Image (tube, rainbow, N blue to C red):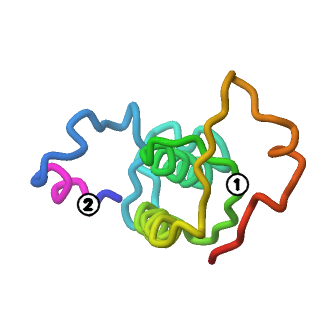
Amino acid sequence: MYEDIEKLKKIGLGKGGSLDNAIVVKENKILNEEGLRNKNEFVNHKILDCMGDLYLIGYRLIGSIKCRHGGHSLTNKLLRKVFSDNKNYSLLEIKGKNLPHTLINNRNYLKSIA
């Protein structure tokens, strides 16, 4: 959001941001000359943000996420909930690059916690 640019700069973020690598919205109007790269750009951004946040935990995840109105804060709350109780997750050592078919095809390993 255009209104956030100065706030981000003041706290040392967005140093490499420009209209070449970001979409800027001001008063519900896209400032980039070429507009959106595709009609799902905002949704794609949310998905990439979520995946990036999940990647930062340092483990590969087996699971699924359904989300509405997500964001960094919501993903953070999810991870805090997951890791608040070791009954919510299992750590498995998997040798090799591929998951065993028993993990892929057996939904009993996945627990719903939220």
Of the pair 26 and 61, the residue shown nearer to us: 61
Q: Taking 2 as reference, is 94 above or below it?
A: above
**Residue 66, horizontal then vertical, whole percent:** 69, 65
Q: Is residue 76 left or right of residue 98?
A: left
User: What is the distance, in whole Å, between disc 1 and disc 2 at their CAs?
Assistant: 34 Å
- Which residue is rendered at x = 31% and y = 36% of the image? 18
Q: In the image, what residue occupies the spot 42% across and 45% down?
A: 56
The residue pinned by badge 2 equals 4
* Residue 7 visible to the viewer: yes
Q: Position of residue 86 (x, y in %)?
A: 52, 66
Whether residue 28 is visible: no
* Left or right: 42 in relation to 102: left
The nearer-to-camera label among 1 and 2 is 1
The amino acid at mark 1 is Gly
Q: Which mark is first along the chain, 2 or 1?
A: 2
Q: Secondary structure at mark 2?
A: helix
Q: Residue at x 40, y 34 (%)?
A: 21
> Can you identify the residue that label 1 sits on?
63
Specify whether 112 is left or right of 7: right
Looking at the image, residue 92 lies above or below residue 63: above
Q: Amino acid at mark 2?
A: Asp
Q: Position of residue 46 (x, y in %)?
A: 54, 54
**8 within the magenta span:** yes
Point out the stretch of residues depicted in magenta: 3-9
Q: Secondary structure at mark 1?
A: loop
- For label 2, the crowd category at 10 Å Cα-Cα, with few meaning under 14, some 14 to 19 and many 20 or more, is few
Q: Is residue 108 left or right of residue 11?
A: right
- On residue 102, which mark appears? none
**Within-10-Å neighbours for mark 1: few <14, some 14–19, many 20+:** few
Question: Which SS type dominates the magenta stretch?
Answer: helix
The image quadrant that residue 6 belongs to is: bottom left
